[in-house]
Image (tube, rainbow, N blue to C red):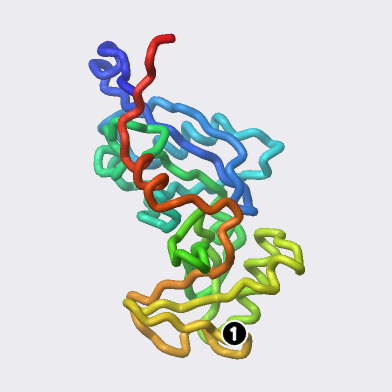
Amino acid sequence: FRPRPEVVESGLCPLCIRFFDSRVREVGSKIIMVPANGTVQDIMTEAARHLNPAWGITAPLRVLETVEGTLSKQYGPEVATNTLTCFHRPNIFYHCLRVESDAETANGDDADVLLEIYHCDRASQQAFAQPLLLPVSRGEKSGSIKKRCKDKLQVPDTEFKSWRLVRMIRTTRTHLKDDEAWDSEIITDAKFYLEHVHPNPTSNLARQSRYNKPLTIKAG
């Protein structure tokens, strides 16, 4: 994707934004033009103009970047647009922004931590799909967190019963028991994921072949 010269000269930057609902499902997408020397607030303002009421996404919004199934960055409204990882990447459809409702701010949630929980394939141990952000309290039990993940994603009981909540500290994985607190070990670089079977498994080679390639459109 290459913007027309007149767009570049105007100081505008094309970005692809993808809208996600409360169940972390992509419900829409849009190519927007924002000032290259602007801020994430400009992106939020432009994104708000394209919200469909049927999606159930309401302000305030938050803007995220995810890479290979995990959260790369959550951006505050004051962040400069030209510092975004996706800024001027050749394939804006791959290097896109995730826009969703910032429900925790809207509801005045007083949870201690906004915890990233991603999906991990049980066989390959590779992250996939989109991570969820869940407000959790210090000392909250794994069973409570799992139930809230299930309710948020609306996963059937028959499927969710085989899912596990895992805490990974560097290379050490711990399957958390339902009565165990998620923060029973306080480690700053701990990661958390839901381990289950990938619904549409693909080979490493197929995944790598699509990674970070410029978009090429050939004439018919």
Q: Position of residue 102 (x, y in %)?
A: 54, 53
Which amino acid does the dot numbered 1 rest on?
Answer: Lys
Q: Up-down: is 39 above or below 102?
A: above
Residue visible at 63% across and 53% down in the picture? 22
Residue 92 pos. (x, y %): 37, 32
Q: Quadrant of the C terminus?
A: top left
Q: Residues within 10 Å of mark 1 (few under 14, many from 20)?
A: some
Q: Quadrant of residue 89?
A: top left
Q: Give the residue number, with chain letter if any, for mark 1.
A: 141
Identify which residue, 71 or 69, lies in the foreground. 69
Q: Quadrant of the N terminus?
A: top left
Residue 120, how many percent across, how many down? 49, 64
Q: Quick one: 195 or 179, which is closer to the camera?
A: 195
User: Which residue corresponds to the image point at 41% horizontal and 77% vertical from the top-left?
Assistant: 168
Percent x, y of residue 26: 58, 43
Residue name at image x 41 percent, y 45 percent:
206
Residue 180 against residue 157 in the figure, above or below: below
Q: Vertical placement of 45 versus 85: above or below? A: above
Q: Residue at x 58, y 87 (%)?
A: 177
Label count reads 1
Q: Secondary structure at mark 1?
A: loop
Describe residue 129's horizontal placement relative to residue 21 as left or right: left
Q: Is residue 103 left or right of residue 95?
A: right
Q: In the figure, is residue 158 to the left or right of 106?
A: right
